[in-house]
Image (cartoon, rainbow, N blue to C red):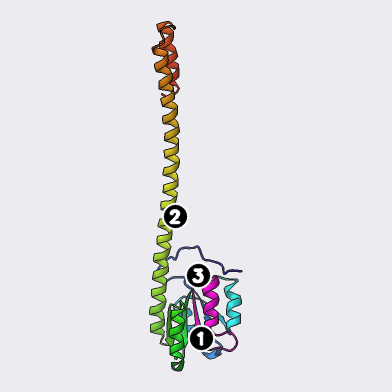
Amino acid sequence: MVCKENKEKLKTKMDNLKILVVDDDPVNLKLVKKRLQKEKYDVTTAKSGSEAIKLLLEVFFDVVITDLMMPEVDGIGVLETINEKCHQTEVVIMTAYATVKNAVMAMKMGAADYLEKPINFDELFIRLQKIATLKFLAKDADDLREAMSVTEENANSTIQNLEMVTSRLSDSCSRARSLLINKDIEINKRVNLTLEILSSYA
């Protein structure tokens, strides 16, 4: 099973990011959720990595902000699931100072960024703005590629139609020429037959 993908275009660079916050610390989870909601983000929370993975397979999220150190399924486990099944979801790792090296490793595995605890929310909002901007640009690029593909298909169809018309017109001209030079047919009849052939393409 793969996660659902969001096909809707972001209305603005900062607006409507759908965010999943994952942390086994209920105090930090509540704090991050409150601050994000204050900035008008659409926020869902998960109290464990396993709960986060279950949500990811049911709902699309633009961004997952996950604690690195959690029992059972940790932040790396969440990241691995996203890499495998949720290719349009970005990951920001929350980590304590002692595990910064692990956070750097997570970035090498595809995480967009990391933040040390306690979270500096100004830095978090800057990272989210960067992610939203990149998503906005990527969506515009996808729209442009789709429009170019449609234009190319229409052009190919038009060319094929023109080739068919040209072939039929060439055939008619050849038939008309043969009629006009056929002296076995009375001249007026030749002209009338030729006009009939050519008038069908007028």
Residue at image coords 44%, 44%: 154
Asked if residue 150 shows in the view, the reply is yes
> Residue 25: which quarter of the image?
bottom right
CA gap, disc 1 and disc 3:
20 Å
- Crowd around label 2: few <14 · some 14–19 · many ≥20 (10 Å): few
The residue closer to the viewer here, 34 or 154, is 154
Question: Does residue 67 belong to the magenta stretch?
Answer: yes
**Where is residue 12 shown, x and y percent of the image?**
41, 67
Tag 2: amino acid? Glu
Q: Secondary structure at mark 3?
A: loop
Q: Where is residue 198? Give x, y as percent.
A: 42, 20
The amino acid type found where label 1 is placed reads Asp
| Marked residue nearer the N-terminal end (2 or 1) | 1
- The magenta region covers 60-85
Q: Is residue 13 magenta?
A: no
Secondary structure, mark 1, is: strand
- Cα separation, mark 2 vs mark 1, equals 37 Å
